[in-house]
Amino acid sequence: MNLVLLERFGAIIGGIVVGFVAFYALYKDWKTPGVENQVFKVMLLLLGVGAVVALLAGLGILGSFGKAA
Amino acid sequence: MAVASIPQGAHEEVDQLYAETRELRLQGFLLFLISDCVLFSSFIFAYLYLRSSGQGWPPPGIQRLDVAFAAWNSVVLFGSGATMHYALENWKHGNFMKYMGMLIATIILGAMFLGGQGYEYTHLIYGEHVSWAGSGIFGASFFTLTGMHGFHVFMGVCYLTVLLLQSAGGVYTKEKYFGITAGTLYWHFVDVIWVVLFSIFYLL
């Protein structure tokens, strides 16, 4: 297995795990009050989005692989 | 030398002061994050403007950035955001050992991200001959923005290490832990900034 495939595989698995954890934490904290918790919810949402973006990049749906310009 | 004794009731006064000023400190810290957000935004919009006004991207002679490695490195940083969140949750629930484990995992993942960025810089500078000053807008904007972000990650790793030592030393209690909250907010902020940088540099 070459290095690029290994990196893509890591991005896919990591993206699924982190995305799940972020959205689950968001779901759990959804009803918590207070300013800091509202900020945490926004941050968790964006973290989850970031994980999905990395997952899609790992799958080759976003971005283009290889060195071609 | 005589040491001034702590008067009776001083701890209660400190607790009361903490409770009264906590919201104020939170607002101050959020203002700091907003100001940092403005700083990054100005550089990001400058980059996007310059990129859109150029002819083709990346510029001729420069190859596309390595998406696979960047995606993997991004997941490492986002994973550290998740571990930091659970570190705070464990602190709130009084699970000290789990908190320490999550905090150490966050520090390791943050350091791994920095190592990955160092590897990528080395590859770009020595392998692809891309530099900050000699590769036009591309090099200048890439190294400025990712370098600034990397510096934030480095400072975050230092901050979390201090938090680790302070927590082990008993500085924070179950009621008084604003430092941990601020650390978590800062680390999430660093993660969120990377979501944007990863998208505009590697995926657009």
Image: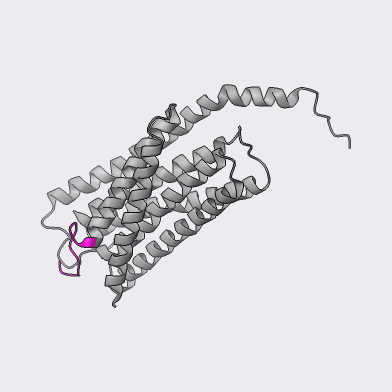
Considering the whole magenta stretch, tell me its main secondary structure.
loop
Q: Position of residue B54 (x, y in %)?
A: 13, 53
Q: Report which quarter residue A61 is drawn in.
A: bottom left
Q: Which span is picked out in magenta?
A: A59-69
Q: Is residue A19 above or below residue B31?
A: below
Q: Nearer the viewer, residue B133 or B11?
A: B11
Task: Look at 43% across and 64% down and name the residue there.
Answer: B115
Residue B115 falls left or right of residue B142 = right
Q: Nearer the viewer, residue B132 or A54?
A: A54
Residue lying farthest bottom? A1
Observer able to see residue B35: no
Q: Position of residue B128 (x, y in %)?
A: 27, 71
**Count of all numbered marks drawn on residues in the image:** 0
Residue B40 falls left or right of residue B80 = left
Q: How is the image coloured?
A: one colour
Task: Look at 56% across and 48% down and name the residue there.
Answer: B99
Q: Position of residue B154 (x, y in %)?
A: 47, 54
Q: Nearer the viewer, residue B16 or B99?
A: B99
The quadrant of the rendering that contains the N terminus of chain B is top right
Q: Position of residue B183 (x, y in %)?
A: 50, 42
Task: Look at 40% across and 42% down and name the residue there.
Answer: A25
